[in-house]
Image: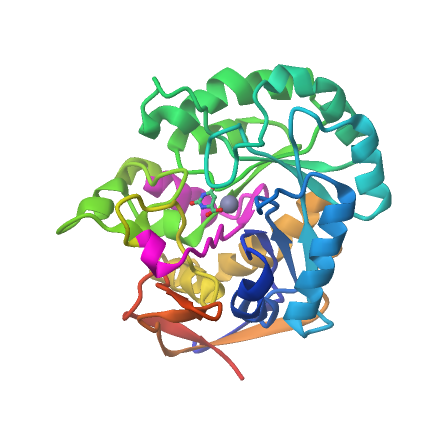
Amino acid sequence: MTLLTLTRPDDWHVHFRDGALLAATVPPVAAVFGRAVAMPNLVPPLTTTTAALAYAERLRAAAANPAFTPLVSLYLTDHTTPDEIARARVAGLVAAKLYPAGATTHSAAGVTDLGRLDPVLAAMVEHDLVLQLHGEVTDPAIDVFEREARFVTDLLAPLCHRHPDLRIVLEHVTTRAGVAFVQAAGPHVAATITAHHLEVERSDLFKGGLRPHLYCLPVPKTRTDRDALLDVAISGHPRFFLGSDSAPHARAAKESGCCPAGVYTGHHTVLHYAEIFDRHGALDRLEPFASHHGADFYRLPRNADTLTLERAPTPIPLTLPFGPAAELVPHRAGETLAWRLQD
Ligand code: DOR
Ligand code: ZN
């Protein structure tokens, strides 16, 4: 197959940042995806419907593509109220994001006690909002490679039990345990899988030296875990779908003494996924994963138009512009992808 036409895909988890950076981060995503769920971990975080709507407007302006729809999720804190959830729904928001406080980039304002959020979660059921989870425990005593698996057993399982009707997405799942939990859960529990977690195992972070551009959270796990993600992504399971977690950081920060978490795939997201599915003989499963399952889970219509890829080389630049004064290093910089967007 040299041409691959799919229902236009959506990215259900992406970081665009804000201000002068939007000109670099939004157009490449808006040129490919019908919709993208923009993460609200800005400074300050988008904790109100008003702030989320204003951000959606900035994203729309930066996209310069009226066919692209940015979806912004609401940032949950210890102080989010059920009324805010009702307002979010009336305003057309479809999801709220739960960052355990301290789990990752700009999560300091996140939730410290999931148990105390129950009235908000009940309101999310009532108003039909999807809960997006950064699924890692934050106890510093727990090994960083164990934090997702512990989140699943200690927090997610009881949460699903308390709120069986809440629609939940375990974002950027990285473990076999996380995959197994979602597979065994009911129709209300799903997961996104990033392209980089389908490729990278934890040893790759240390291959020939420390690789800051592969450092992200949740941190990639073992080969067995990576293979569990691959198996389920290409299996056609309807509750696993595309969420790139493309997360740009300036090169200077990534290559500093304390590298922030984030892998940037944004300019080439769909091409990374196409290459991975192709390598595993599953190109026919790319469309459901990238274009159908997410829309179905979010109860939104599938996109009506299509995107065509062709089997032709796409070189990934060594760097990309990132705002007026910085650059970023894309995932697999300097390598060549096997697929290209058709003009
Ligand atoms: O690697 C990550 N980067 N994981 C996250 O959870 C946040 C993200 C970011 O905002 O940079
Ligand atoms: Zn993210």
**Residue that appears at 53% across and 31% down:** 182
From the viewer's side, name the closer residue of 216 and 169.
216
**Who's the residue at 72% across and 25% down the image?**
121
Residue 265 visible in the shown view: yes
Percent of width and height locating residue 125: 77, 29
Quadrant of the frame with the N terminus: bottom left
From the viewer's perspective, is residue 145 above or below residue 153?
Answer: below
Q: Is residue 300 visible?
A: no
Of residues 282 and 270, the one drawn nearer to the viewer in this rendering: 270
Task: Tell me where residue 177 appears, x and y as whole percent.
Answer: 41, 28
- 138 with respect to 146 (left or right): right
Q: Is residue 228 in the magenta section?
A: yes
The residue at the far front in this view is: 325
Q: Is residue 156 left or right of residue 140?
A: right
User: Which stretch is magenta?
Assistant: 226-254
Farthest bottom residue? 343
Tell whether 317 sits left or right of 63.
left
Residue 206 image position (x, y, % from top left): 19, 45
Residue 343 coordinates in the image, percent (x, y): 54, 84
Along the viewing direction, whichever of 200 and 65 lies nearer the viewer: 65
